[in-house]
Image: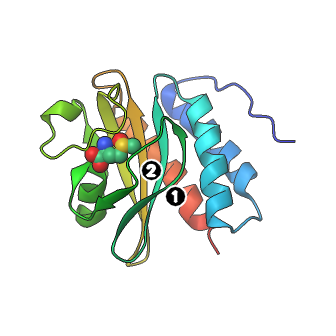
Amino acid sequence: MFVAAALTGSKPEQYSELVQQARGLLAGEPDRIANAANLSALAYHALPDVNWLGFYFFDGKELVVGPFQGKPACVRIALGRGVCGTAAVSRQTQRVDDVEAFPGHIPCDAASRSEVVVPLFRGEQLIGVFDIDSPALARFDADDVRGLEALAQVFVESLA
Ligand code: SME
């Protein structure tokens, strides 16, 4: 059984511990659904002030919701739409301090106030996005972005 130890230290140190836990959790398993599900559960329960955390996968046309923790979410997001579609098209992590100020933001859980979306690429190939929502305004800073990008990288590297 995998037991996630409580995170300690500065925020970068906590993310570093979480990344190590994620590596252990995903080690030796290449299945995309299994790893997205377990990484969502690990990170959702480790990170404070998060109300939705999970994956959208690119099906060749648009983003389709994958494993996540939180309330039920919108299923399909067109490329270029919302924070998720913007991250996928721009290939840049989107950090949104106030989702209501983001043009085209797609509300899934009405409680969400700030959001980070990390695009997932293997080489040139779009895999999907890793999306994290918070009920607090400006919940995420640069340390969160770096930590969430590192977690996303663990997921990408785990894939067969
Ligand atoms: N807010 C996202 C949609 C996904 S939910 O937050 C889970 C967006 O604007 O793309």
Q: Residue furthest right?
A: 1
For the point 23% across and 50% down, the residue is 82
For the point 68% across and 67% down, the residue is 31
For the point 43% across and 77% down, the residue is 123
Vertical order, 8 against 91 (above or below): above
The image quadrant where one finds ligand 1 is: top left
Q: Residue 88, image x and y in percent? A: 31, 62
Q: Residue 65, image x and y in percent? A: 45, 55
In this view, the residue in front, 154 or 60, is 60
Vertical order, 87 against 143 (above or below): below
The numbered mark at residue 6 is none
The Cα atoms of the two marked residues, 2 and 1, are separated by 6 Å
Residue topped by disc 1: 153
- Asked whether residue 92 is in view, the answer is no
| Colour style of the rendered protein structure | rainbow
> What's under tag 1, amino acid-wise?
Gln
- In the rendered structure, the answer to whether residue 92 lies left or right of residue 15 reads left
For the point 26% across and 65% down, the residue is 79
> The C terminus appears in which quarter of the rendering?
bottom right
- Asked whether residue 32 is in view, the answer is yes
Vertical order, 157 against 137 (above or below): below
Disc 2 CB within 8 Å of nearest ligand 1 atom? no
Q: Helix or strand or loop: what does disc 2 sit on?
A: helix
The numbered mark at residue 149 is 2
In this view, the residue in front, 98 or 75, is 75
Contact, mark 2 vs mark 1 (Cβ under 8 Å): yes
Q: Residue 15, image x and y in percent? A: 55, 37
> What's under tag 2, amino acid-wise?
Glu
Q: Helix or strand or loop: what does disc 1 sit on?
A: helix
